[in-house]
Image (cartoon, helix red, strand yellow):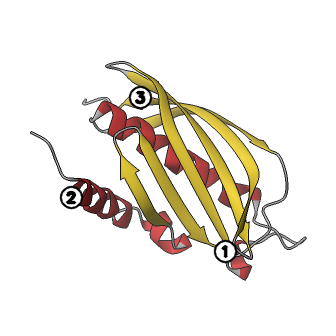
């Protein structure tokens, strides 16, 4: 049974709304398709570190969540992050962060996904981080 893109996006937004930390930060699900996601996060002063750019933990959170959405929608089962690595390539300066992730290799038990995180300033996107992670099927004990 196929689900329309609008219904799929609405389901993804419902899941995001259940994540209290994501609500606290103000994360928005902008786009969702099987194996692909775009999360956005408006930057506020309380999400910045002492030098005025997004705290690395905020950038890392956004990448982790995007990787998990990409893997979970590709596998179409409940999932968690098993591991991920992030490279910060420049300070995240701007009004908003955008994380775009895509599943690269998918099996029944795991998905390896990649993510790019951009800082948006004055309408221009600049790459600020690259991440890769392994997303695994949630064990049903």
The relative height of residue 4 versus residue 115 in the rendered view (above or below) is below
The relative height of residue 16 versus residue 66 in the rendered view (above or below) is below
Q: Earlier in the sequence, mark 2 or mark 1?
A: 2
- Residue 7 bears which disc, if any? 2
- For the residue carrying disc 1, how many other residues have a C-alpha within 10 Å: few (<14), some (14-19), or many (20+)? many
Viewer-side label of 2, 3: 2
Q: Earlier in the sequence, mark 2 or mark 3?
A: 2
With 12 as the anchor, is 28 left or right in this view? right
Name the residue tied to disc 3.
136
Secondary structure of the residue carrying numbered label 3: strand
State the CA–CA distance, disc 2 to disc 1: 28 Å
Please name whichever residue, 47 or 130, is drawn nearer the observer in this view of the structure.
130
Secondary structure of the residue carrying numbered label 1: loop
Q: Quadrant of the C terminus?
A: top left
* Circles 2 and 1 in contact, beta carbons < 8 Å: no
- For the residue carrying disc 2, how many other residues have a C-alpha within 10 Å: few (<14), some (14-19), or many (20+)? few
Please name whichever residue, 10 or 14, is drawn nearer the observer in this view of the structure.
10
Q: Residue at x 44, y 41 (%)?
A: 70
Q: Residue at x 33, y 63 (%)?
A: 13
Secondary structure of the residue carrying numbered label 2: helix
Q: Quadrant of the N terminus?
A: top left
With 5 as the anchor, is 128 left or right in this view? right
State the CA–CA distance, disc 2 to disc 3: 24 Å
Asked if one can make out residue 74 in the rendered structure from this viewpoint, the answer is yes
Name the residue tied to disc 1.
43
* Circles 3 and 1 in contact, beta carbons < 8 Å: no
């Amino acid at each position: 049974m196929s689900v329309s893109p609008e219904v799929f996006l609405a389901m993804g937004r419902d899941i995001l709304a259940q994540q209290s930390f994501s609500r606290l930060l103000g994360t928005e699900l902008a786009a969702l398709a099987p194996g692909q996601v775009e999360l956005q996060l408006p930057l506020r002063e309380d999400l910045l570190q002492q030098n005025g750019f997004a705290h690395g933990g905020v950038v890392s959170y956004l990448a982790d969540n995007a990787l998990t959405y990409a893997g979970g929608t590709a596998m179409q089962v409940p999932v968690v992050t098993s591991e991920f690595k992030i490279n910060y390539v420049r300070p995240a300066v701007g009004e908003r962060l955008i994380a775009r992730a895509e599943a690269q290799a998918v099996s029944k038990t795991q998905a390896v996904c990649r993510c790019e995180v951009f800082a948006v300033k004055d309408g221009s996107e600049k790459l600020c981080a690259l991440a890769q992670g392994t997303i695994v099927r949630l064990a049903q004990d």
